Image (tube, coloured by chain):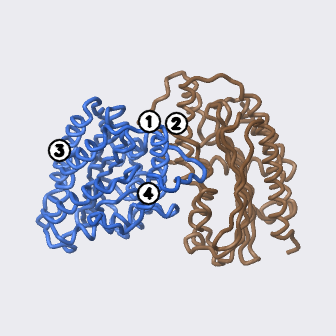
Chain colours: A blue, B brown
């Protein structure tokens, strides 16, 4: 397979991490990232970067890692593979903003290899507004469709549907947010483009992260909010915790492969709330948001 | 098998719920329980009782349920059984107190039946102090040993070890708290006592809950605390969330059998915090607590 090497993929992802951190610091204007460079016992390591108490960002993390070693049995089973010699690299981001009208955003691009033979790309971007605002949702999905369409017109509809399926909190019967795109085990035989094309696609998603989020932040960062808005934000953060700890495959993979706990769980919010049987008031913005947290919404049409 | 009927077990557990709620209301002195009676789509139902914003209790739940129906495949596999016609009844409690020096407490007693043929009891009480205080830990374990010893002298050492193993946050390499007793699939062939004896043992644990917690509450409820103590409490609550959502078998069973979500997740704290890579100060009470959150501590000897 004449394909770009894992080292080269890791290097490019590292540069994307740098670019994103610089972009987010410029956007925030107050806080800067603190970096922790770590090594993994089983092989490899990473650079965890955390930004806190900013003007826009209450807590956010932009992780790069490139790890290798032996897959635990449980993960081999889950992946349905026999090979155990793995290499994985990627950039992973979660941003929890201060203002409840600014959405939580998550992005991940990753590359995975088994025994230097089996390989695939995975990743995606998805948005979790505390308050769903239709024009923002439409903007977000338009941007994602635009990036996808440059590579394969089949990507957006397929990956949008996958995001709806993936970012679903089954026990709550609600989606985590308004979805976005999600792809996994992407290989040339599943698309019209080459390995290089798929790699480029992942980089394009990574590089689109800052401009997309900047737009969404700038539309909402100065909106006034009340204590009740803030409480709702914390309740939605509670749902975010539920999704990440109960369902998220990346979190499970990290915890099961003895990944660095603080880097994996940087996705958790600075604080969250749970209120027994909270009911949104009829006709409220909270109720409107809940009514939109479902699979299969066509955000482009709204 | 000449054994007390499932209906009789459920009835007695219901009375224990009543007794515990009355005891906790008297202890709190300010708040009272609100009850929600619910039915489960697949069969059975329960009484969820929540107490909030009290003098002692910030948020607490005392659930009774008696549910039946068909076990999902995933649960049959996890239980390693072929039978699918299940009945389960139990009382389950989690109390999150206001004062960080008052411990979080959890109690559960349950009875499980499959196809009217296979049956077992399970349950336990465990304590999660935000600040481990040795004299309280010793008192707590002494009380549990005392109850256990009345039924079978093998119970306390065995069930204490099981609690250490069960209430373990593997990815943090720390126990949830100071443990207690935990037993599962308890049947007469695993002990010297009869079905009636095992049932009585479960009721004795249930009825010991209020006096034990009352003592621990009264020792600590009026202690002064700082903002830093409160923040530490919220960080420890974050760990509680991690345990319950990632590892707790009861939570998983509930979510997988389409249990009532609000009743299952009443165990989650009113709010929790996550701080990136928090380090306790050398020599602090927080560091002391962390040093004790490990398996195999003999609290009776301390």
Q: Residue at x 79, y 66 (%)?
A: B189
- Residue A171's place in the image compared with B169, above or below, is below
Distance of label 3 from label 4 (alpha carbons): 40 Å
Distance of label 4 from label 2 (alpha carbons): 32 Å
- Residue linked to disc 2: B235
Mark 2 belongs to chain: B
Q: Residue at x 81, y 52 (%)?
A: B18
**Marks 3 and 1: same chain?**
no
Is disc 1 in contact with disc 2, using a CB cutoff of under 8 Å? Answer: yes
**Marks 3 and 4: same chain?**
yes
**Disc nearer the start of the sequence (1/2):** 2
- Residue linked to disc 4: A288
Q: Nearer the observer, disc 3 or disc 4? A: 4
* Residue A59 visible somewhere in the drawing: no
* Residue A163 visible somewhere in the drawing: yes
- Residue linked to disc 1: B275
Distance of label 1 from label 2 (alpha carbons): 7 Å
**Disc nearer the start of the sequence (3/4):** 3
Q: Nearer the observer, disc 3 or disc 1? A: 1
Q: Residues within 10 Å of mark 4 (few under 14, many from 20)?
A: some
Distance of label 4 from label 1 (alpha carbons): 31 Å
Q: Nearer the observer, disc 4 or disc 2? A: 4
- Residue A188's place in the image compared with B98, above or below, is below
| SS for dot 4 | helix
- Residue linked to disc 3: A15
In the rendered image, the residue lying farthest to the front is A283
Mark 1 belongs to chain: B
Decide which of A181, A74 is in the foreground and name it.
A181
Q: Residues within 10 Å of mark 2 (few under 14, many from 20)?
A: many
Counting from the top left corner in percent of width and height, residue A40 is at 34, 44
Is disc 3 in contact with disc 1, using a CB cutoff of under 8 Å? Answer: no
């Amino acid at each position: 397979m004449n394909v770009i090497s894992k080292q080269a993929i890791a290097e490019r992802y590292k540069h994307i991490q740098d670019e994103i951190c610089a972009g987010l610091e410029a956007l925030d204007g107050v806080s800067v990232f603190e970096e922790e460079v770590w090594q993994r016992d089983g092989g490899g390591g990473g650079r965890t970067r955390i930004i806190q108490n900013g003007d826009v960002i209450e807590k956010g993390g932009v992780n790069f890692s490139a790890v290798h070693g032996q897959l635990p049995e449980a993960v081999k089973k889950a992946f349905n593979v026999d090979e155990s010699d793995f290499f994985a690299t990627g950039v992973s981001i979660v941003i929890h903003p201060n203002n409840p009208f600014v959405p939580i955003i998550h992005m991940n691009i990753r590359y995975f290899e088994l025994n230097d033979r089996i390989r695939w790309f995975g990743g995606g971007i998805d948005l979790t507004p505390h308050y769903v605002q239709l024009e923002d949702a439409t903007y977000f999905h338009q941007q994602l469709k635009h990036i996808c369409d440059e590579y394969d017109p089949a990507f957006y509809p397929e990956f949008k549907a996958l995001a709806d399926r993936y970012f679903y909190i089954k026990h709550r019967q609600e989606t985590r947010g308004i979805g976005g795109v999600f792809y996994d085990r992407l290989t040339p035989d599943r698309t019209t483009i080459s390995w290089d094309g798929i790699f480029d696609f992942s980089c394009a998603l990574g590089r689109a992260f800052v401009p997309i989020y900047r737009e969404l932040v700038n539309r909402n960062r100065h909106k006034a909010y009340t204590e009740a808005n803030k409480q709702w934000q914390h309740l939605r953060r509670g749902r975010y915790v539920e999704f990440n700890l109960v369902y998220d495959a990346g979190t499970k993979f990290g915890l099961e492969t003895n990944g660095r706990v603080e880097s994996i769980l940087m996705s958790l919010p600075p604080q969250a709330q749970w209120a027994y049987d909270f009911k949104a008031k009829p006709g409220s913005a909270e109720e409107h948001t809940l009514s939109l947290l479902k699979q299969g919404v066509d955000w482009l049409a709204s």
